Amino acid sequence: MKKIILFCFVLIVLPMLSLGQYAPPAGQDGSTAIYCDSSVFVGWATSCVIERGLQQLGNPSLGYASYGEDAAGCGKADNNVVSLGDGGMAVFSFDSPVCNAPGPDFAVFENSFDDDFLELAFVEVSSDGINYFRFPAVSLTQTDTQIDGYGNIDAALIHNFAGKYRALYGTPFDLDDVEDSPLLDKNNVRYVRIIDVVGSIDPQYATYDSNGNIVNDPWPTPFFSSGFDADAVGVIHDVLHNALTEINVADRMVYPNPFHDFIVFDISGNADCAVYDIMGQIVIQKSLSSGVTRVATADLHPGCYVIRLIIDGHIVNKKMIKK
């Protein structure tokens, strides 16, 4: 009897363990993909400098990736790309620096033709162009068998890698995810660097995620279009559009937290209020008068939100949870 119970337990639990832990492909419930025409974008990278990698590490006779020009990485995502090659990199810069604000701050676009053929890259940011800091990327893809050059990846098994979504859908990145450092000013990010992951599970060539796992993605790809295909970097928050001074939320009362069917605002003075979801989309927007105002939130899905008030030229941000 105990063996039967154990067998049933294994049948139930193992499939659950194999389910993705992260956001699924574009268009599916829970996806974080952002379409290139979204109104959340306030700008695009204006410079892109490429350092090509080999078409295939370990086979230098094939030469370097050569598809596309550096300029293809500039401007709005349009599926016109430049290929990085194995371990190649692209450095993007902007007219107005990216800054840290509620939700994702920028998004990276690749040119995958479907939701499963994904070529990945690490993403790093810098204020000075010298010291770069990497987003903590995670890959839960199996590492027992090499994904071949035409193989597939489940987007729900990867997190904080560029290339997670198909063409024209950006992968969002939130500067809050990057470890704080005195060498990085998150409100003055002038450079975004993208580095192809290579994808080999051979320890001689492998690259590793933030947990020390080998990153398995399609490899080898011994073509002139080898590696990550950089399309664009879309800016969601930048200095130009977030120049107002931020003040402590303790000066204004916003409650309860967590909330259910309503949020109460107890403020001195009139204010513009916006409620952002985790994608940085505005889900509630209204003007508030001085005093106590109760705003209905029953239609919001459970999850994390950011409340932003603009009062007398000052910004007040508060993260809140909907139960």
Image (spheres, rainbow, N blue to C red):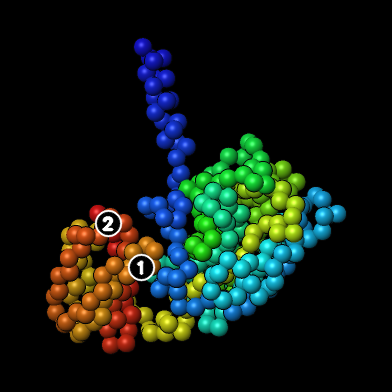
In the picture as drawn, the residue positioned furthest to the top comes out as: 1
Q: Secondary structure at mark 1?
A: loop
How dense is the environment of label 1, judged by Cα within 10 Å: few (below 14), some, or many (20 and up)?
Answer: some
- In-front residue for pair 15/168: 168
- In-front residue for pair 208/47: 47
Can you say whether 71 is above or below 313 in the image? above
Identify the residue shown where x is 77% and y is 58%. Answer: 54
Residue type pointed to by label 2 = His
Q: Which residue is mark 2?
A: 301
- Cβ–Cβ under 8 Å for marks 1 and 2: no
Spot occupied by residue 55 in the image (x, y as percentages of width and height)? 76, 56
Q: Does residue 294 appear in the picture of this structure?
A: yes
- Placement of the C terminus among the 4 image quadrants: bottom left
Residue type pointed to by label 1 = Gln
Q: Is residue 48 left or right of residue 60?
A: left
Spot occupied by residue 163 in the image (x, y as percentages of width and height)? 56, 58
Spot occupied by residue 52 in the image (x, y as percentages of width and height)? 74, 64
Q: Which residue is mark 1?
A: 281
